Amino acid sequence: MLVLDAVRVARNYDRSVPRVYCSVTHTEDGAWSVRVTNAYGGEADRGERGRVSGSGRADRGTVSGVVDPIEVCLCDKMRTSPPNRWGEVYAEATRRAGSFANGAKVHARGVEFWRVYYGVPDMSVAEMLEAHEADKPRWDPALVIAPKRTQKLALEYRERVRSIVCDAIDALYKYLRKNKLKLDASLVRSAFSLVRNSVDAVLVTKPGSPLSGAMYPAFVLDEKHVPDPLKRTVRLAASRARDSGENMLGENKNNARVLVVKDIEDKSALEALLAHEIAHAITVPIWQPNNNHPPAFVEFETLTARALNGSL
C-alpha cells in the first residue's frame, strides 16, 4: 500500500524512531495478518489475525511496532486540508491515534516532519500563490511552451506521448484504487482529465526552454499559450482559482494539468521524463522554490516508472 510504504520510508529519515516494517496481508473475506520485521529483515513480531471493518480499523488482533498518527488515521484529511491547517488536523489525528493503532506504540513526530516529507509549507493558499507567482521566471509558460506552428509540426509525437501517458495512468489508477488509495487515485484521474480528452493538452517545449517538461496547472496558463480547444478550460480554471480561497487544493477541483514535454526520441529517456512529470500529479500544484521534489514525490516517481514499463 503506497501510503503505508511511504510512511515506512519516511520513518527511516527519523533516526529517533525504531525502524520497524509492517507487512499487511488481506484476504477476500476481510481477514488480515501482519508481519513485523526489524531493519535487518529479521522477524520482530507477528500480529494476531483479525478482521478490518469498513473504516479500515482492525476490530481485533494486536500488532507490536511503532506507528505515526498519519499512518492510522486522517492522512487524506490532512493532505486535502489547506496547508496552514495541517497543524490542527495532525493534532486531532494524534489525539485519536491511540484508538486506531490497534496495540502498536504511537509516535507523533510532528506535523513539521510531514510538511517536509510531502513538500507542503506552512502557508495559506493565498501565500502559496503569491510565492508561486514570485518564482515565475523559472516556470513562465512564455519561456517553455512552443508556439502553435511548432505544436502542429509535432502532432505525431504529441499523439505518441499521449498514448504512452494514458496507458501508464490507467495502470496507475487501477493500482491505487486496488490498494484503496482513493485520494491519490483521484489526483491522478483529475490531473490527466485534459490529457485523456484531447491531444491538445499535450504540448512540446520550445528550443532553449528552461524546463524539459512540466505539468502546468490549468489555472496558471494564459489563454494565448494553449490551443483553442483549451482556452475555455484555462479561463474557467483561473476563475475558480481566484474564487476558491482555502479550498483550491483540498477539493481537487483545480488539479487539471497540461503536460508539456521536450521532443525526445530515445524511448528510455522519454519514459524517465514522463515518469517524473506524471509523479507531479499527486503533489501540490503550486511549485515552491527548492521544494518541488520532496521525499513523497520521489517515492511516487518510482511507482510511475513501473507503470510506464508495464511492471506495476
Image (cartoon, rainbow, N blue to C red):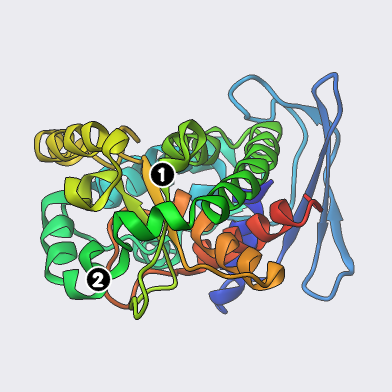
Q: Point out residue 56 in the picture as x, y percentages from the top left corner.
A: 63, 29
Q: Who's the residue at 30% across and 43% down the image?
A: 227
- The mark that comes first in sequence, 2 or 1, is 2
Image quarter of residue 42 = bottom right
Question: Which residue is located at x 39 percent, y 68 percent?
Answer: 116
Number of residues whose C-alpha sits closer than 10 Å to that of mark 1, classed few (under 14), some (14–19) or many (20 or more): many
Looking at the image, which residue is at 12% across and 70% down? 134
Q: Is residue 88 visible?
A: no
Residue at the far right in the pictured view: 42
Please tell me which residue lies in front, 35 or 62. 35
Q: Which mark is residue 201?
A: 1
Q: In the displayed structure, does residue 209 sit left or right of residue 20?
A: left
User: Could one spot residue 249 in this view of the protein?
Assistant: yes
Residue type at numbered disc 2: Leu
Where residue 170 appears, as percent x and y from the top left, is 65, 37
- Residue 119 position, x and y percent, is 37, 64
Please determine whether, in this image, residue 84 is positioned above or below residue 204: above
Which residue was labeled with disc 2?
143
The amino acid sitting under disc 1 is Ala
Under tag 1, what secondary structure?
helix
Asked where in the image residue 269 lies, by quadrant, the reply is bottom right
Regarding mark 2 in the picture, which secondary structure is present there? helix
User: Would you say the residues marked 2 and 1 are in contact, meaning their CB atoms lie under 8 Å apart?
Assistant: no
Asked if residue 226 lies left or right of residue 131, the reply is right
130 relative to 151 in the view: left or right: left
Category of crowding for the residue at label 2, using alpha-carbon neighbours closer than 10 angstroms: few (below 14), some (14–19), many (at least 20): some
Residue appearing at x 86%, y 28% in the figure: 27
Q: How far, Cα to Cα, is label 2 from label 1?
A: 17 Å
